[in-house]
Image: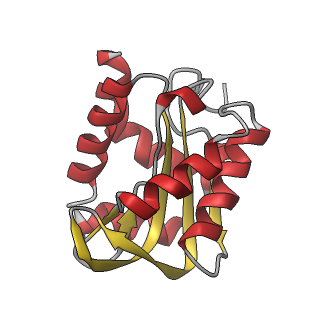
Amino acid sequence: MDRPPEDNSWVKTDLVMAPLHAQNAFEAITLLGSRLYAAGYVRESFVPAVIEREKKFATGLPTVGIQVAIPHTDVEHVLRDGIAVGVLDSPVTFGEMGNPEGTVEAQIICLLAATRADQVVILLQNLAEMFQNPEVLQQIVAVQDPVRIAAILNSHLKTVKEVS
């Protein structure tokens, strides 16, 4: 067996875009959301809903060094669980989570598609905790390989699937 089955993982290699080129946050969300839609994870309403939510509730995390955004929306737009990940070749500006005046230059974007609201909360907590480690962020940006990026993220997200 080449690699373990990914059935129960949040990040599938075909949902990882590295490098990702986008001019702004909304283009990055659109590109990643289109990947989720094409793979059958979300409804057509997903991308517009994420963008509308992002305008009201920013998702940029002010992490040390490499910065991150975790856009998401309501579960009614989601068909099955998954996370699309983009590692940008050049950071884009997101609003800062919990700080209407702040901005974040995000280089890693994790676009969440969760079928249950309680999963979204747990995912956000797990990701925010993982992204407090600058070494993990450096690894994700440095590898530029969807298989390895998925493995790094999934190793930190196991507890979310176990809880669900």
Q: Does 135 sit left or right of 50 as displayed?
A: left
> Eyeballing the image, is 151 above or below 162?
below
In which quarter of the view is residue 21 placed?
bottom right
Residue 26 position within the rendered picture, expressed as x and y whole percent measured from the top left:
59, 68
| The C terminus - image quarter | top left
> Eyeballing the image, is 154 above or below 61?
above
In which quarter of the view is residue 88 placed?
bottom right
Q: Along the line of sight, which residue is nearer the eye, 66 or 146?
A: 66
Q: Residue at x 33, y 37 (%)?
A: 123
Residue 154 position within the rendered picture, expressed as x and y whole percent measured from the top left:
43, 38
Residue 141 position within the rendered picture, expressed as x and y whole percent measured from the top left:
47, 70
Residue 159 position within the rendered picture, expressed as x and y whole percent measured from the top left:
29, 26
Q: Residue at x 32, y 79 (%)?
A: 103
Q: Along the line of sight, which residue is nearer the eye, 158 or 79?
A: 79
Number of marks in picture? 0
Q: Residue at x 49, y 29 (%)?
A: 75
| The N terminus - image quarter | top right
Q: Does 53 sit left or right of 77 as displayed?
A: left
Q: Along the line of sight, which residue is nearer the eye, 31 or 3?
A: 31
State the scheme by which the image is colored: secondary structure
- Residue ranking furthest to the right: 38
Q: Along the line of sight, which residue is nearer the eye, 130 or 84?
A: 84
Q: Does 38 sit left or right of 103 as displayed?
A: right
